[in-house]
Image (cartoon, rainbow, N blue to C red):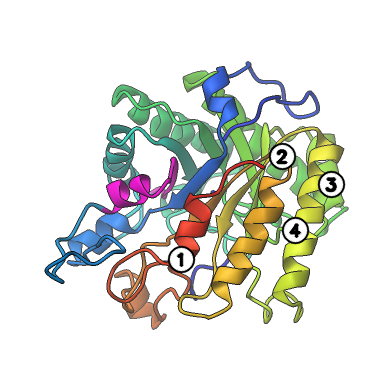
Amino acid sequence: MKKISLILGITILFAGCAPKPQQTAPKQAEWARGADLSWLSEMEHDGMLFYEPTETPSGEKESVDCISLLSSLGMNAVRLRVWVNHKTGWSNLPDMLGLAQRVSKEGLRLMVDIHYSDFFADPSHQAIPEAWLSYDYDALCEAVRNHTIDVLTALKNAGIEPEWVQIGNETPNGMLWPVARLVDKDDNSNGCWDRYAGLTATGYKAAKEVFPDITVIVHVDNAYERRDWFWQAMKEHGGMWDMIGLSHYPMMSAWNGGKSWQEMNELAEANIRHLIGEWQCPVMVAEIGMFNGNALSDTVMADFVRRATAIDSCAGIFYWEPECYGGWRPAEYIPLGWGSYDMGAFSDDGAPTEVMRLLLSSDKQ
């Protein structure tokens, strides 16, 4: 999903996805109630504070650590993105590692979202990192392997074992454009599917070199959209994954063909069930977002949580950047003229909203 406007476990891992070692039972048993908090360190740098959602007897509040606050409300997992070399330094490896250490100290599970780009990667943007611009396909494969190993080894050296890793972010149109851009859904005459699937398999194998038990996710947008062609082509061309990741923004009717939120949630539920049955692997809702302050948001979240928790092999839900509030925007948005993210799940007084309570109190039915 474009970021300019603006989540575990399974008792059984099925045989149809790329083979992986069996994980320990505790990791497989628990529904993931998560949040992507990748902007948190920059928000703290800018002086943004976070508060409990209840008043104190004196009416005054003391700020609290955002990760600890969300953990106390039921969050059990955090997703963090990592860019190759963004010019501001935010979401680069050192920044991600610092946040990951805080997540680990809190006893939470970790998902690492590797973008293989210097900035946001999504269906409309999959830019090759500046340092890799001169690389041909073989060199890009080596860069993907090395970057994946570097990111995960840094975590390992810090005593942190992530449970999941994404090989790319929202890649239904491929990655590392133009080398592995999927121009035509079914046509491999230009080699695009071979290159994209090859890069994904390279990242998969590299991740397993560092953490053999890690769950590797391939992530696409539009949870409502049936994309059998994508997964079939991935399989045919040697792509590898353990889990499917989806993004779900049910209130974005302007981007979703004018569909109502009810239809969006119904379609997403049906697609998750279909993917699990067709590809015999679990599905994670790696991103979700509701419009902050919209009166319907609580209803939309409650409805989707009810649907998702009723699906045996739906692994969990991660809210995308819920900590955003008060019109804050990251440094890189300002020169671009972009507005603030409008789907945070904190109120203007810096406290989690009912949307977050609904997610963080959810569990398997």
Q: Earlier in the sequence, mark 2 or mark 3?
A: 2
- The quadrant of the picture occupied by the C terminus is top right
Q: Is residue 127 left or right of residue 20?
A: left
Task: Quickly name the residue at label 2.
Answer: 197
Q: Which mark is residue 274?
A: 3
Above or below, comparing residue 263 to residue 157 in the picture: below
Q: Earlier in the sequence, mark 1 or mark 4?
A: 4
Task: Quickly name the residue at label 1.
Answer: 354
Task: Quickly name the residue at label 4.
Answer: 268
Residue type for callout 4 = Ala
Nearer to us of marks 2 and 1 is 1
- The quadrant of the picture occupied by the N terminus is bottom right
Nearer to us of marks 1 and 3 is 1
Q: Please report the residue visible at 31 percent of the width from the left and 48 percent of the height from the top.
A: 67
* Residue 231 position in % (x across, y down): 80, 44
Q: Which residues are magenta?
A: 66-84
Q: Earlier in the sequence, mark 1 or mark 3?
A: 3
Q: CA distance from mark 2 to mark 3?
A: 22 Å
Give the quadrant of residue 227: bottom right
Residue type for callout 1 = Glu
